[in-house]
Amino acid sequence: MGKPTVNKNWKPLSEKSRQNFREILSSSIPVVNNGVRGKKKVELQKLLDRLISKIDKKFETLLVPKYSKKANFDYNKIHSQNQSLEMALANELEQINQMEIKLEHETMLLKEDSELLTKLKSDKKAVETRNKMLHRTKLHPLLKDEFKDLVDLDNELIKSHIKPLKDRSLCIWDSEQDHELCEIKKSISSHLRSIEKNTKVMDNVVSKVEETEKILIQLMKKASLESY
């Protein structure tokens, strides 16, 4: 149908029709807001108000075909279909809300595990520093001068220098016999293995969170909630 024909035979919506549309849109807001919490609810309310204003402004210049006053509209059927759509939308929004709660919980757990891993790494570094200090301060006097300027010292290096001594009783300190140090090293190693295992599990959680985010975006689009 050509534009001249439309301009000639079609007419703008009446004020009464526009008012009916405004009431329908306004009554839908509580359904859309159902399940949304806190600041998000306020932001969503403002977004929907702006959307209704834009739609109403479009109605001012919108041309529609003329229809007979005797036209038989099945308002009960239209109302029933509208209620079905509202229920479907409410269910979708509730699912979105539950997924957001789960996402927040998983994010919190990931943050806690990351902080714990950082702390354990720091503790491990402190133990290693203490280990080096013990090596330097408790070596046999004959070996102190040799290790005086040594920065990176480990057990294997200590053993390689102690081994030539035939009488090991001359050594004041042996790292293998320091039960306190061994317990600390064992505890730190155990914690690190546990954290590394947990972070592998969280990698899968992060992947699922990203998939959840994509689903949320699609649901928001279906609900006509994207920003204008």
Image (tube, rainbow, N blue to C red):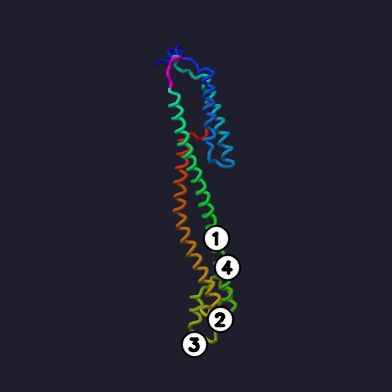
Residue matched to label 3: 166
* Circle nearer the N terminus (2, 4): 4
x then y, percent, for residue 143: 56, 81
Q: Is residue 43 above or below residue 19?
A: below
Q: Quadrant of the rendered structure where residue 121 is?
A: bottom right
The outermost residue toward the left is 1
Picture residue at 60% right of the left edge, 77% below the top: 137
Residue matched to label 2: 173
For numbered disc 4, what is the local secondary structure? Answer: helix
Which residues make up the magenta segment?
69-73
Indicate left or right for 65 with 131 as reference.
left
* Amino acid type indicated by mark 1: Leu
Q: Nearer the viewer, mark 4 or mark 3?
A: 4
* Amino acid type indicated by mark 4: Ala
Answer few, some or many: residues within 10 Å of disc 2's Cα (few below 14, many 20 plus, some between 14 and 19).
some
* Circle nearer the N terminus (1, 2): 1
